[in-house]
Structure formats: C-alpha cells, structure tokens
Image (spheres, rainbow, N blue to C red):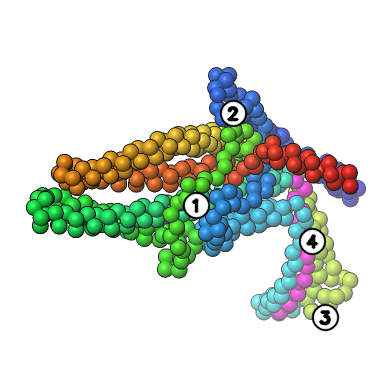
Amino acid sequence: MMRMFEKFIAYSTAALLSGCMVGPDYVSPESEASAEALAEAHYYRDENLWKEATPADKLPKGDWWSVFGDDVLSDLLKLCRDNSPTLASAYYKIEKAREAVRIDAADLYPHADGTGSFSKAERSLNLSGSSSYEQWLVGMGFTWDLDLFGRVRSMIEADTADAQAQLYAYNSLLLSLQMMVATEYFTLRQYSSEVDLLIRTLQVRKEQTLLVERRVKLDYASELDLQRALQQEYEAAAQLATLERQIAISKNRLAILVGLSPSRLMMNDAPLSEKLPKLPEAVPSQLLERRPDIAEAERRVYAANARIGVAQAGFFPTISISANTDLTANRVEKLIEASSFAWGVSPQIYIPIFQAGKIYAQKQVAIAEHKVTVEDYKATVLEAIGEVENALSEINYLEREYSKRTLVTKASLRIQELTLRQYEQGYVDYFSVSDAQRLALENERTQISLLGDRFRACVSLIGALGGGWQMPKEDGDETSENAKNSDSSEG
C-alpha cells in the first residue's frame, strides 16, 4: 500500500511540473477592416489598422504639456497628478488587484497550519475506571492542491491581467484628468482675453457716452442717441459681470480637479497667445496603441481568456494531499515522549460525475464573457480612431475658420470706425454707431472663443493619442545631426 502511495505522489508531482493547463491559448483581439474603409484617405489609417494588439502604454511619453511652453499649465498638471484624491483612489485599486494575485498564487504551494488544544473531562461515577482524565494535543497539518489541470494557474493569469488592466485604467484616468485640467485652463485664459477686451470696450463706451451727452447739450444729438450710448455702455458692463462669474466657477472647477479647495488655488489670469503647438500632419495607427484605455481593453480580453481555462478545469478531477502530525498525551509532561507521536497522510480526489450541466454552463458563461471583451476591445479601438479623426478635423477646420474670422473682425472694426466718424460729422444717427459697435464686439469675442477652441482641440488630440507624440525631425535638424555624428566619428 505504501509503495502504491509513493507511485501516486511521483506521478502527481511529474504531472504538476509538466504544467498541464486545459484552457485555450491566448489570441490577441483582431479583425478585418473593410476594403472600402482602408481605401479612404484618412490621416492615420493604414493596412494594419486591426493588426495584432501590442499595447504600448508603457512607452515613455514624457511631459506632453511641454509642447505648449506654459509653466503655469505644467505646475497645474503636476499638482493634479500628485494631489488628486480620485487618482489616489484608483492607485489603491491597483494595490488591491495586485494583492488578489498573491492570494491566488498562494494556492500553488502547500499550506501548513498548527493546532493546539487541551481538554479535561470527568466521567460519571456509575462507570468503572478513572472518574476524570485530561488530553493535551499539539500538532501540525499540511494541505497541497496539486493543480494538475491548471485551474489555479489560470486564475493567477486572469488576476494578473486584471491587475494590469487596473494599472492602465489608472493611467487612463490620469490622462483624462489632465486633459480636463488643460481644457479648463485654456478656457480660463480665453475668459481672461475676453475680460481684457470688455474692459477696454467699457472704457470706450463710457467716453462715447460723455461725447453724446455733450452733443445733446449742444443740440447736435437727441435724447435717443444718449439712451443708445448708455445701453451700449451697460451692455458691456453686463457682459463683463457675466464673464467674471464664469471665471469664478471655472477656477473652482480647476481647483477641484487638481485636488485643492477653491480658496487655495492661486493663479494669475493671462490672456491667450497666438502661438499654438506644432502638430503632426499624419498619425499612424501604431500611435493609438499608447492609449491606456486600449491597453486596458486588451488586458480584459486576456483575463477573460484565462477564465475560460478556469471553467474548463472544472471538468477534470481535483487532487489534493493532506498530512498531519501531532503529539497527544493525557499529561503535559508526556507530550515530548516518542510514544505520543502520531501522523497521517490523506490523498483526496474530487471527480465531477454529474452536475446537471452546471460546469458546462459555467464554461459557456466564460466563453460569452470573452466574446464580450473582444467586442469591447474593438469598440474601444474604433472610438479611439474616431476621437483622433474628430480632433484632427477640429484643428484643421478651426484654423480655416479662425483665419476667416480674423478678416471679419478687421472689417467690423473698420466699419465701426467709419460709422463713428460719420456720426461725428452728422451724416448718421447713433443707431448706426451702436449697431456697428455691437457687431464689432461680437466678432472680436467670437474670434477669441475660436482661439480658445483651437487650444482645446490641441488638448483633445493629445488625449486621443494617449498623451503626446514624437515630432519628426526637420531636414535641417537631420542634416546637422548627421554632421555631428560624422564629426564625432572622425574625432
């Protein structure tokens, strides 16, 4: 009997070391794009749009915000990374997922536990023999699940992929929060530009109101002209008050995003500049692999694939070995005697014979979940492609619109100037002046808003690409670099 047991242990250990796993091999999610879609002239699509997934979220992206050359923005984004409680919560979710892997990994190894007990009993006096006795016990037990068919190892693979997905989810959240901070920041700068415009406009409106008042006293203008001048002045003041309210709310939102109470956020308002970051003219599909949400979706597919292996292992026997040793005596001083020693070994096997379709259903659930994650992966890739295309379209068309709006603004300012001159010469009434001023102010504010949209579109493109990009070297830079390498080689 002992020889048979030894053979069983040897065969079981050999099977365990052979790494038998019954789950399917992992295949990266991939699909075929239609020929019509690939034939279209898109900025970033190529023949390998649905190529085998190789997430590159770990590639260094650097401080993507440096393309804007704005120190205040850099400080805000670093503050967001270090202070945000939302990010801290996501970080601890990663820690939780990592420890879940360790919990399952522990099942690969033998478990040992110690026991100790003492009992004292007194028998009935109607029974023969001693009326009382004591029992002392000190022992140790061992249990080992052999995992012959890879159930535990498949669980470890699934949990490891989940932990990796949680890390990518953290990176995705970080990028999303930073995009929101950058967007809010450029909105604040847009408001600041509009405030500067309205302050100048309000000052001009007040001066014009005084001018109309003098003309009314000299009978060169009517009371109606004066009321229209006052209306223009009050309208500019009302718009300024509206902007100040929007700035206060925007600053509060920005403070919350960077993890500060609104009263602690101190920053100077600066108007927008005309200098935008240099953008790529073409975006290859490989660049999308840096997006953390795509990497997260791919890891979810891997985890679901591993769980098919867990479900598949349910069809096969589960084999474990339990062993125990203990010292038992009726007096504590006899525990250390050889006669108190006892031991036992108990191999156990569980074979699922009839489960009324439960195990099969569990496998089908795992397969269906895998299909869900594959489709979610494809949807994530398509959404990423759409976001990049939208951002590039925004950038290109906003540039055209902004250039045309600049011409409109110049024309409206010229009309305002000429109309005011005609009013001073008595050719038109103040209605023409007020209408020209209203249109000029609207066009100037629209131009500033478009400039803000252009900065926000740049932020959207960076977010769509997973955080920054590598700009190709200019021809001159490449030539100088080659010259430098040539000089160094000669030296």
Separation of residues labelled 4 and 1 (CA atoms): 63 Å
Disc 4 designates what residue? 324
Looking at this rendering, what residue extends furthest in the right direction?
3
User: Given this view, does label 4 or label 3 mark the residue nearer the observer?
Assistant: 4
Disc 1 designates what residue? 182
Residue 191 circle label:
none
Ranked by sequence position, the earlier of labels 2 and 3 is: 2
- SS of the residue under disc 2: loop
Taken as a whole, is the magenta stretch helix, strand or loop?
A: strand
Q: Residue at x 81, y 56 (%)?
A: 345
Residue 333 circle label:
3
Report crowding for label 1: few under 14, some 14 to 19, many 20 or more residues within 10 A (C-alpha). many
Magenta segment boundaries in residue numbering:
131-147
Report crowding for label 3: few under 14, some 14 to 19, many 20 or more residues within 10 A (C-alpha). few
Q: Residue at x 56, y 30 (%)?
A: 43
Ranked by sequence position, the earlier of labels 1 and 3 is: 1
Separation of residues labelled 2 and 1 (CA atoms): 27 Å
> Is residue 365 visible in the rendered structure shown here?
no
354 horizontally vs 253: left or right: right
Q: Is residue 123 magenta?
A: no
Q: How far across and down, in percent of the image, does residue 445 sit? A: 34, 47
Q: 331 or 323: which is nearer to us?
A: 323
Disc 2 designates what residue? 45
Ranked by sequence position, the earlier of labels 2 and 1 is: 2
Amino acid type shown at disc 3: Glu
Query: Do the numbered discs 1 and 3 sit on residues whose CB atoms are within 8 Å?
Result: no
Looking at this rendering, what residue extends furthest in the front direction?
425
Report crowding for label 2: few under 14, some 14 to 19, many 20 or more residues within 10 A (C-alpha). many
